Image: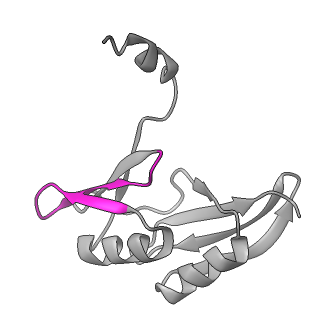
Amino acid sequence: MSTAPQQAEQHHRIDYIELPVKDIAETKRFYGAVFGWRFEDYGPDYTAFMDGRLNGGFDKEREVSKGGALLVLYSKDLDATLAKVREAGGRIVKDTFSFPGGKRFHFTDPTGNELAVWTEPS
């Protein structure tokens, strides 16, 4: 069976994301606890993650820098996700706020990468 139609559907879509981290074990603990992601290690300095829809990786060899691309995750229950981020050791850097498409908050993971989580307006 040909994979050409599946590949064509992926044209110009984000296929894989890599984020720099300082500590692979802490990163896996954090993202596993908050979002339930699964991981596959490729040596001591790299782990791939699977979130059920998009795959990516965490790379210990790259340097973390502020002001890079902002990854925005979706949540059906923003308050519950915010609580999980705090419980797992994430730091809230922008409390929940409204914007025209809904509500969101921003957090940093244990390495210092900033991400956001959003939901539709209630």
Q: Is residue 46 left or right of residue 92?
A: left
- The reply to whether residue 58 is visible in this rendering is yes
Relative vertical location of residue 9 with respect to residue 90 in this rendering, above or below: above
Residue 34 position, x and y percent, is: 49, 74
Query: In front: 101, or 64?
Result: 101
- The reply to whether residue 63 is visible in this rendering is no
Residue at point 64%, 63% (across, down):
117
Check residue 48 for magenta coloring. Answer: yes
Residue 89 position, x and y percent, is: 47, 86
Check residue 110 for magenta coloring. Answer: no
Q: Is residue 81 left or right of residue 97?
A: left
Q: Quadrant of the C terminus?
A: bottom right
Q: Is residue 87 left or right of residue 26?
A: right
Q: Residue furthest left?
A: 43
Residue 50 position, x and y percent, is: 37, 53
Q: Quadrant of residue 81?
A: bottom right
Residue at point 25%, 75% (across, down):
25
Relative vertical location of residue 76 with respect to residue 109 in this rendering, above or below: above
Residue 103 position, x and y percent, is: 80, 64
Residue stretch in magenta: 38-53
Residue at point 58%, 73% (across, down):
107
Colour mode of the rendering? one colour
- Count of numbered tags: 0
